[in-house]
Amino acid sequence: MNMHRSAGKQMQCSGYHLAGVLALVTLVVYIPALRNGFVWDDEIYIVNNPFQGTFDASFLGWAFTGYHGGNWHPLTMLSHALDQVVWELDPFGHHLSSILLHAVNTALVVLVILGLIEAANARRGMTGPHLFFHRRSMLIAAGTTGLLFGLHPLHVESAAWVSERKDLLCALFVLLSIGCYTRYVREITTPANPSIDTAERVNKQFLLAAGCFLLALMSKPMAVTLPVIMLLLDWYPFMRIVSARSFWAVLNEKLPLLFFSIAASVIAVFAQDAAGALASPEFAPLSTRLLAAARSLIAYLGKMVMPTGLSPYYPYPKDVTLLSPEFGAALVMVMVITALCMILRTRHKVWLTAWAFYVISLMPVLGIVQVGEQSMADRYTYLPGLAPFFLAGVAIAWAQNKAERYWTGPRMIQTSAAAFMIALFTVLALLTNSQIRVWSNEITLWTRVIERYSDTAWLAYYNRGIEYGRAGLIDQAIVDFDSTVNIRPNHAEAFGNRGTAHAIRGQYDRALADYQSSLELNGSNAAVYANRGKLYQRMGKTALAHADLQKACGMGDAAACKAL
């Protein structure tokens, strides 16, 4: 018994050391992100936040009762507020907070994976050194998972874009919740009796797991799937679900958590609807959305294996049909993977658990309920990618184990394994560093999207055009607004901004034509009336100027009121 306890303490100590090293490595690799600026939605969450630098009762009421950027995530807004108190609008400090959180999450991944492996071993009733994974294999599996999580370029979007603080906080509390839940299960069950003792059902660890789950929901609603993930873990590796009776017992245990998931889902839908982000049924029929979801599931896996062609924005695909090789093949692959995992579930439950974890955790963002016009986003893989990364770690640990057992020259094998891990680290670090540069500023960001989707990326052209205009590069701005309206002829804002660019260049006739087109598409845009009124003033057309400025002033444009 003492030997087992000593081995357990050694394992725990080794796990903490490994987690700390990988967190430090992740932090070092992400140091270039400290030079990046604010991009995209950072203007909503940080730059134009009405409560900049304040942390009082009115701010807390605003954070907890309002929707921000189409989301209800008060904890995320508290995090941004704390950064603004400390760093004001210096991007360096905001990025520092984000990469520190990502490093902490990397350490937690290692510890959570080790806990789940130990739980799998304990449920098998194994003791002593002959575990499902021996000590070194456990560390290899957890370390590989942590390395991939920390350094994979798919995660740059979450860690190097300040607005995605919600991803980092949500993952932090989901990982803490799973860790607490794992300890809870180990406290109340034994290998001989995996059923629940109702007298001990709610203990300190369960309450901590529930509390962390609520904090995750207040960071990002994507955490709504966690109670289902817990049920999945109850099946394997915890092996608490062995019959219909045991299933209903553990389901009953999760009812409070499921209630919070449903409530958070309803709030999320209302928040997106309030922001006008929910796509109408006419945007794409359900069959199209299901095919696009299947393609996303396979595409994410492909990007995890070969992280090339990454983009900050993926426009919704055209011509989505079952006969298309891209979508039909993806659907077939999803069905084949699911079937294979079901076939293997009696002897190798880990495959079905990993696949189900991946699919379930991605479900809120697969586009079945479409939000916006993007089809995918790298940030959506931040937590779901844990499952494929873990399987990669298991495969590497298994391969080294087999090589040491059946081949001669264990030292050579160890050297080869070390060389492989160093090579993997180097490749990931280089790719991640390159992806961090993409998020440096608005121009680098949207230029990457245009390079990938020049024919459909109207949003990229529009946003880059705005940034060119802010930088005084008026000719480049007009070219980008031209591309925007060519792709999206009903884009009222693009016409309005192009009109302003023409006005700056002194091309008044073109500016007036663009303002007129913008107002025909959207007659409630106060800024366009104000800009046209100011242009009329410059042209000496006082009556027309007064009419437009008065119209804009009536719509609440303060600058137009001053110009009257």
Image (tube, rainbow, N blue to C red):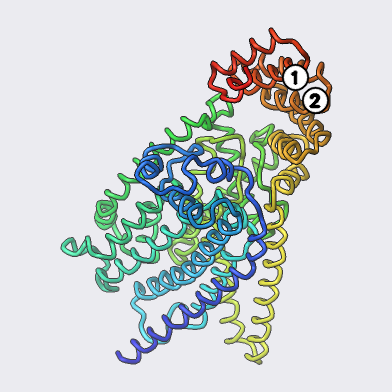
Q: Residue furthest top?
A: 543
Image marks 2 and 1: residues in contact by CB distance under 8 Å = yes
In the rendered structure, which amino acid carries the disc numbered 2?
His
Vertical side of 138 occupied by 59: above or below = above
Identify residue for label 2: 502
**Would you call the spot at circle 2 few (<14 residues within 10 Å), some (14-19), or many (20 or more)?**
many
Q: Secondary structure at mark 1?
A: helix
Q: Where is residue 532? Give x, y as percent.
A: 70, 18
In the rendered structure, which amino acid carries the disc numbered 1? Asp
Q: Which mark is residue 110?
A: none
- Kindly identify the residue that appears in the image at 61 percent across and 34 percent down: 373
Q: Which residue corresponds to mark 1?
A: 514
Would residue 357 be visible to someone looking at this image?
no
Q: On screen, 394 above or below 8?
A: above
Left or right: residue 52 compared with residue 468: left
Tell me: 371 left or right of 458: left
In this view, the residue farthest toward the left is 199
Q: Earlier in the sequence, mark 2 or mark 1?
A: 2
| Image quarter of the N terminus | bottom left
> How far is the residue under mark 2 from the one under mark 1?
9 Å
Residue 48 image position (x, y, % from top left): 55, 40
Residue 443 in the image: x percent, y percent? 74, 45
**What kind of element bears circle 2?**
helix
Question: Count the marks: how many?
Answer: 2
Q: Name the residue: 67% across, 71% down.
A: 424
Regarding residue 243, the answer to whether it shows in the image is yes
> Depth check: 40 or 488 in front?
40
Locate residue 502, reporting x and y percent: 80, 25
- Residue at 28 percent across and 61 percent down: it is 206
